[in-house]
Amino acid sequence: MKTLLMSTTLIAATSTVAFAETPKFMASADPLAIQASEFIGQQIYTTPSEVDAEGYEGLQQEWEKIGEVNDIVLSRDGNIQSVLVDIGGFLGIGERQIAVDMNVLQMVPDSATPEDSTDYFLVMQAEVAEFETAPAYEHSGMSDLSDRAEQAVKTTSAALKNTADDLGNTAQGAAERVGEAISNTMDDVKEITAEVTSDWQDKGYEPIEGANLSAERLTGAPAYGIKDDWIGEVSDLVMSDSGDISHAIIDVGGFLGIGETPVKLELSQVTVLQEVEGDALRVYVPMSSDKLKGIGAYES
């Protein structure tokens, strides 16, 4: 069965034990190895029947497509624990993300194309009913902060729309409702910000004042998003006319410089955190990677 080759760099970074006799680099990959960039996006099929690891001739009629791999979850020792799959509109199942244990997935060769040794199907043995009760995958305790922030904005938008409808009746009442809606939104944002700060402190980090920052320290710092997930790193900084750091350029996504999207953010839009018992820096951006990419790539 084929193995998944993430990259020697990633494996070396996640390994906890190193042996002097173990090669640090690979000159070439195993012919049957699969890179993560090829694995992500693969269709996953399910069947109630036992899966024959020797192969099948083409896609089988009883197989049901459940979605495609959109991310990989690694353990600290570099092993793949599970793959993340978005299922939605599937036989009436509500849309959500689930994590499928890597041990239940089988890479089954496609015997219809014997000349292509890299052609395979990703199949698991499971009943369709099991997916109806499969739990949604939670990234962390902060996973609901994005939804709460979005809901706060929706509440404000609804209040403003109602206000516009009421303008013909009472301008004073409408103005009061606008003030109340904005106030409620600010309270929600403050509450979310407080939770984020508390969560980072639990992880051993605390906000750092701008006076203690330098371009040399901040460049290369990892960036984390609203779901407490790694979204990229600080690749460059923009200085104001007065010599202060005004903007940060964050390379969102990608791997080893490939497929990254540089996004320019005002320094006030990010929170810089320093390790409480060390000098390591991180930056927190209250947005998802998709929303950041939607800003548009920065061109210097």
Image (cartoon, helix red, strand yellow):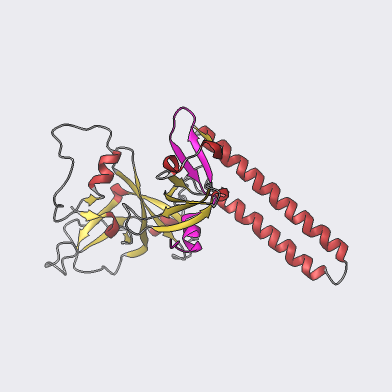
Q: Which residue is nearer to you in this view: 189 or 48?
A: 189
Residue 37: image quadrant is bottom left
Q: Position of residue 55 (x, y in %)?
A: 18, 61
Q: Which residue shows up at 18% across the image and 68% down it?
A: 57
Locate residue 246 relative to residue 216 in the image: left or right: right
Point out the stretch of residues depicted in magenta. 271-300
Q: Is residue 120 above or below residue 24?
A: below
Q: Position of residue 155 (x, y in %)?
A: 69, 58
Q: Is residue 285 above or below residue 261?
A: above
Q: Which residue shows up at 28% across the image and 33% down it?
A: 16
Q: Evaluate whether residue 182 shows in this view.
A: yes
Q: Residue furthest top?
A: 277
Q: Which residue is nearer to you in this view: 154 or 271?
A: 271
Q: Which residue is nearer to you in this view: 218 or 10?
A: 218
Q: Which residue shows up at 16% across the image and 55% down it?
A: 32
Q: Residue furthest bottom?
A: 168
Residue 297: image quadrant is bottom left
Is residue 242 one of those drawn in magenta?
Answer: no
